[in-house]
Image (cartoon, helix red, strand yellow):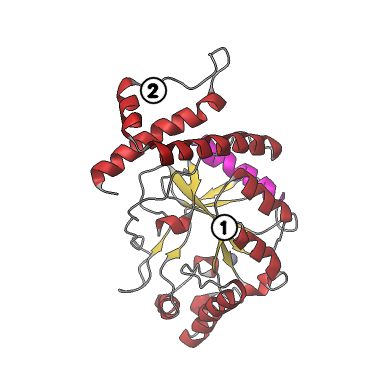
């Protein structure tokens, strides 16, 4: 989309969004029905290509109704805010200051440079394989990315196939989850490129993202990752647990584009289940006015 057309379409979408979610948010005592758009907005709406946008609004309305019902079912304090459409121009990702390991390597970052109030949810390792998590995330419409380590995933490849079938992209977190800086270049390459090949063989798609175990890497890690097709190395700005959030930034808060880390874990390691963790993290995310978006849509 061009700048002007894109802006017009976005304004029209915003109006439709208000119209679509309006009834569910209407305060008690107010008359039911769509709020009347402001005169200027109405003109934008009428000028927009009616068919596709009207369909989009209807889809949005239905998904909001479903989200409210799902939030109730899964015990969320508030329904998740709707995920905005993917950006038409992807942001330029640069390595975070202080995280550099040499020129020409895949960028290492903890936050995606965006202005919209979106954050990204990423889950690591693969130990806990809770079927409730799959249903919960699908019904709530919350996107996330999985960073898988084969030594845990191999116990049940089928679980992650179901996840992939539900639109989750499966990314690389090494074969055996070692502390990579302690390994030679060849050993690191085996851990990273081996997992690339394995995910491609099992799931038909080669990852483009890699996260080093413990967030630990050196220049050889990034060179090895680049050698087998890794484009970017997302770390995290905050970590979610069933009973708390842990923050990287001094202000102990979320920021637009922050990547949130959590794990496939359950009561063996945590004071709660994966659905408990999702309830906790979504209370924070929605409460602070953020929507969860799909990381791959921005990279
Ligand atoms: Zn890990």
Q: Please give the label number shown on residue 37.
A: 2
Name the foreground residue: 11 vs 223: 11
Residue 295 position in % (x across, y down) = 47, 56
Which of the 4 image quadrants contains residue 283? top right
Residue 289 visible in rendering:
no
- Is residue 111 shown left or right of residue 194? left
Residue 88 position in % (x across, y down) = 35, 52
Q: Quadrant of ligand 1?
A: bottom right
Residue at the image point whose x is 30% and y is 24% from the top: 40
Residue at the image point whose x is 58% and y is 45% from the top: 281
Q: Is 52 contained in the magenta span?
A: no
202 w.r.t. 236: above or below = below
CA separation in Å, label 1 and label 2:
34 Å
Give the extent of the magenta segment: 271-288
60 w.r.t. 213: above or below = above
Q: Which residue is mark 1?
A: 167
């Amino acid at each position: 989309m061009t700048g002007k057309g894109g802006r017009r379409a976005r304004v029209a979408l915003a109006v439709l969004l208000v119209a679509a979610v309006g009834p569910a948010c209407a305060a008690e005592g107010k008359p039911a029905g769509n709020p009347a758009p402001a005169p200027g907005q109405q003109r934008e709406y009428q000028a927009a290509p009616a068919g596709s946008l009207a369909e989009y609004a209807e889809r949005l309305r239905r998904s909001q109704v479903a989200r409210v019902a799902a939030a109730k079912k899964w015990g969320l304090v508030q329904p998740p805010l709707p995920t905005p459409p993917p950006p038409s121009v992807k942001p330029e990702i640069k390595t975070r200051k202080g995280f550099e390991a040499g020129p020409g390597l895949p960028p290492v970052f903890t936050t995606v440079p965006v202005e919209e109030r979106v954050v990204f949810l990423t889950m690591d390792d693969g130990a806990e394989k809770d079927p409730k998590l799959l249903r919960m995330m699908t019904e709530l419409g919350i996107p996330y990315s999985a960073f898988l380590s084969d030594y845990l995933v191999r116990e049940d490849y089928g679980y992650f196939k179901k996840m992939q079938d539900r639109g989750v992209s499966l990314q690389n977190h090494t074969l055996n989850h070692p502390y990579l800086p302690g390994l030679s270049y060849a050993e690191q390459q085996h851990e990273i490129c081996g997992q690339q090949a394995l995910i491609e063989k099992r799931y038909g798609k080669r990852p483009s993202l890699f996260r080093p175990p413990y967030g630990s890497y050196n220049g050889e890690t990034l060179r090895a990752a680049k050698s087998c097709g890794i484009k970017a190395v997302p770390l995290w700005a905050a970590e979610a647990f069933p009973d708390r959030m842990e923050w990287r930034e001094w202000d102990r808060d979320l920021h637009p584009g922050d990547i949130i880390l959590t794990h496939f874990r359950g009561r063996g390691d945590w004071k709660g289940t994966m659905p408990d963790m999702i309830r906790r993290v979504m209370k924070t995310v929605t409460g602070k006015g953020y929507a969860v978006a799909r990381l791959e849509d921005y990279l």
